[in-house]
Amino acid sequence: MKKIFLIIFFMPFIIFSQSYIVVDHTHPSGTYSVEETIGFNDSCHDLDRSSSSWDFGDGTGNSFGDDDDHGWQYHEFLSPGTYTVIFTHGPTVTTPVCGSTPAAYSDILIIKIVEPKYVTLSPNPPHAGETVTFQAHEFSMPNYIYWDFGDGTTISSARSRGGISAGSTVTHIYTSDGSYFVKAYDGGDTSSTPTMKKVTVLPAQRSIQFSPQSPLEYHPVYFTASGFTTSQIDWNFGDGTILTQSSKYQTHRYKSKGSYTVSAKDSSVSHDPVTTFVTVLPDNRFLEASKPEAKPDEAIVFNAINFVGDLVLWDFGDGTVISAGHQVEHVFSRGGVYRVTAVDENGEGEKKYEVVIRILGATDEVNLEIAEIRLDNGKYYKVIAKNSKDIKAVLKMKLRGTGIISGYWTLDGVPFEFINEVAVQGELKKIYTKDIPGLPTIDPGIHRISLKLTRPSTELIFPTLKYYVLPYENRVEIISPPDGFVAKEKEIPEFTWKEPAGGVKYKIAFANYLYKFIYNKEKINWIDTALDRKFKPGNELWKGIKRNSWSYWKVQALDSNGAVIAESDINEIKVVIATAEISINSAEDLNGKAVKISQNGINSGSDAILIKGSIKYKGHSKYLVLRVYLDDQMTDQLLFRDVKKDEVRSFETSIPNRGKGKVVFRVLKTSSPSVVIGIRGLNLIKKK
């Protein structure tokens, strides 16, 4: 490199006790180039430098004595940057330092080193389809640069000598990955030597995003094609819908549940399509009415459950159409059957949801559709303590037509209480015996209740209900198992009860036939449990209880003299031979999110739980029925046809989650009568 000597005096006005570093070359911009030979010296040339040293700030330096160049040191910086150059005066100075007293001290100079001409890019490295910003540095004519990006593309915005040129900052998009050499011609002169920069372009980061992540049938799904080279995209949504040269932003609705493969590619670029997978869950929107039937001018509240838009387009079927929220109230003025419909997203949705409402007018002509009588425990028998008020009878019925229901209850064969009430068509009407005067419980023994209807006129004969009044006022309250418990043959439950007032000793009895407990016509085998208020049957006793049909048990409490002072109600139990296995495999909430199943059951805040499981029967059956109960109320019934031995059949069922509850699965073999051949329990807890 050529050595250029130029001494720059930075602070000429300082005369005493001060020296500084001088440089032999400068540039109009105040910077120096990489690999340019630069000379450094101290301003006091008469200094004895035998113990001085230089540090150039790039990890190099030296110590020296006087030389032929009178102290000049030459250095080349190999990389651009800002460096701190330090000259240190040694402590053995013997000659005056610019008129000062000899001393040890340092001089410092900040120097900037740059490439003579160079090109930078951001991001580095870029991806195909990504916008890259190029910038030319230290060009003599930065506003007139001709760019060649190495992929056949050039950029220019103004004419200058020798060609067409652009500015020092430009952008470019590479459509394919690979290595490219970018050329930048200073002043736009393509006949001159260009400044070059190698660019390594990585494969494109194309992707498809969509929301929501767990979409439902008929709900909108929003897709975005990210990182694509062009704005014209070819789409395939996997359900037969194909769009070409369309926007990178798409809204699509799937009309059936399932898994779909969605693909997208640039319309004008040859590359493999980008794919993603979308799992569409069943649509969970529905309409709910506060009542299925009503009288004219009686308000009915409608709820659009799980609708996504703020507004719903309501059509009540009587000429009234409104746009309103998810809950509305409507009054029908005339009798008839109305089909109420609702469309989500203020009518922009693709599916109508409906509920049928019947508005009834009064008529003298009424007929029974269904009718039954039971005691308040749901059975046709009950055991109660003497003088207890805990006994009622109830009539359940449904009518065709709306009108007056008349009749009377009979007690022990004579009229006891008259009824005269209005019943509405389609309504499940319940009529209870009155509290005052209630059914008599003074006389111990069996009492019989029945009902006679006088309007509507009917040939229907109701059965006779029986309740047994104990000869004592105390009663034993059962803890477990609950009345109507179904037990597996090999899972013997423990029978427990509470301590009644005055109770000291206890007895328990089992019977395969109800009349044995009601009439006491056969000798009852009472088992003494002494002071224990719990009992677990032994194998022999457990084997003596009938299988696959109802059996009965009750408890007596005795005082210290051995006299019976209290007795429990008659409780039912069924022991089943479990030849069908029920497995609970997984559970999901309404959004398709997995719900954990633990030994304690399912704990979820969702309003409903989708349970997936399977059954396996150890034989052959033309039909198997799976019944699902929540707190003794049946919520679902599934039928399996032509079941083979040890064949696994899958099932799905939706359980409402109203809070703490017990879910029971029962498998029945549909012989005559049907027999429970499998049972499985599951606790359900709703998070707060």
Image: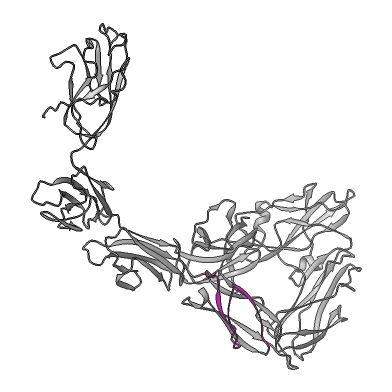
Q: Is residue 310 magenta?
A: yes
The residue sitting at the left extreme is 191
Q: Nearer the viewer, residue 470 or 67?
A: 67
Most foreground residue, 45 or 324: 45
* Residue 520 visible in rendering: no
Residue 574 or 420: which is nearer the viewer? 420
The x and y percentages for residue 159 are 16, 57
**Eyeballing the image, is 58 above or below 333?**
above
Range drawn in magenta:
308-333
Quadrant showing the N terminus: top left
Residue 505 image position (x, y, % from top left): 83, 49
Give coordinates of residue 573: x percent, y percent. Answer: 68, 62
Whether residue 452 appears in this view of the structure is yes
Say if the magenta span includes residue 371: no
Instruction: Give x and y (percent) for residue 198.
Output: 18, 46
Residue at 27% x, 7% y: name it: 92
Q: Is residue 377 left or right of residue 304?
A: right
